[in-house]
Image (cartoon, rainbow, N blue to C red):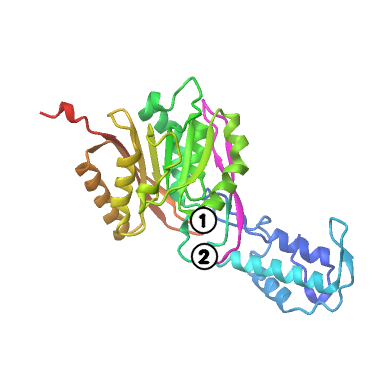
Amino acid sequence: MEIPILRRKPSYATITQALEKLKLKPSSWEGNAEPEDAKLGDDGSDNAFLMSVIMSEFDWLQDTQDKAGKTLSIDEQKERLVQEASSRISERCGRSAAGEMTRTWVIPKSLNTPEIRFDIREPPLTGDQIGLKTWGTSFVLAKRLEYIGSEYLGALVDNESISYLPTVLELGAGTGLVGMAAAAVWSTNVLLTDLEDIQDNLLFNINKNIATVTELNGSISGDVLDWTKPQEALELLIVTQFEVVIAADPMYDHEHPALVVEMITKFLKKGSESRALVAIPLRDTHTEGMALNFSTLMENSGFSAVYRDHESFKDDWTSENDVQVQWTIWRRVDRTLTP
């Protein structure tokens, strides 16, 4: 389909179809975001078309019906067209400028698990609410969970019987991708937590994907956990000790390494068999410093690293540069074995 030329007075349906074709559909960092029809606007004409839609008076339009059979006045048609064109422009300005979107994240099929698809809603980014966005670290870790579970977590996630109490806790769950993937891949019960401001969207995503998790014998739930108020944390839950604690990209301020260590210390089950899985992106000297500080604090708090690895990934859906993510599995040190 070619981009319509407005001076030829195309119909409302034709313009709407072109705007839909120009929608950027990012593919979970497996490739660059591009229009549904890559041939559309590859010469830059898409931007010119979008601006012409916003500026046009559409004086040739007449009352028409939409796909649902509802009659649309000329003003209603103009409003819809301008809104869609504005959305397409926002998508081309990066994630922070884009509005609400739902993206499908695919965990590839393996010998032991089928392909798993999660539909994740991301509201518009506002202020410092970075938990409303699915970051690249989450996708990297979600795809590695089967390997991590089989190689390093063993019986902690390989249970033949389903537990009706949470055995895995996720800190700073954000949009919920990692926690839901853990529940599905490991067929276990995961509690996803984050700040109260993030909770509405987190619960929305949990409810949207609960059937996918249940089909794989997993279970998911959400709750509020403010790291600065540990005395109020999960006070209504029966279980406050977990076999596995997960945190993916949990630090963006200088006080966060200490807070994450405190939460792991508080909620990870006592004993040397439990495990903490923490993934930290090494974006710059600031995040590298936090990763080093976190490791030092964990060691000083009685933990040791069982395994550590690094992987490259795209940090954002419009990113051109690779970022290294460091993921580490931690265990409590058995003090009884210390001379």
Q: Nearer the viewer, residue 226 or 321?
A: 226
Instruction: Give neighbour class at mark 2: few <14, some 14-19, many 20+ (Cα, 10 Å).
Output: few
Residue type at the position of mark 1: Leu
Can you say whether 90 is above or below 330 in the image?
A: below
Residue at the spot x=78%, y=74% of the render? Answer: 6
Question: What's the residue type where badge 2 is placed?
Answer: Thr
Location of residue 43 by image quarter: bottom right
- Whether residue 117 appears in magenta in the rendering, the answer is yes
Residue at 34%, 36% (x, y): give it.
268
82 left or right, relative to 181: right
Depth check, front residue: 32 or 119: 119
Relative depth, front residue between 283 and 204: 204
In this rendered view, identify the residue nearer to me: 156 or 194. Answer: 194
Write the residue at 77% across / 68% down. 4
User: How far across and down, in percent of the image, does residue 188 sit?
Assistant: 49, 30
Q: Quadrant of residue 239?
A: top left
**Stretch in magenta:** 97-120
Q: Residue at x 45, y 22 (%)?
A: 159
| Residue 242 location, quadrant | top left
Residue beneath label 2, please?
A: 126
Alpha carbons under labels 1 and 2: distance apart: 9 Å
Q: Which mark is residue 132?
A: 1
- SS category of the residue bearing label 2: loop
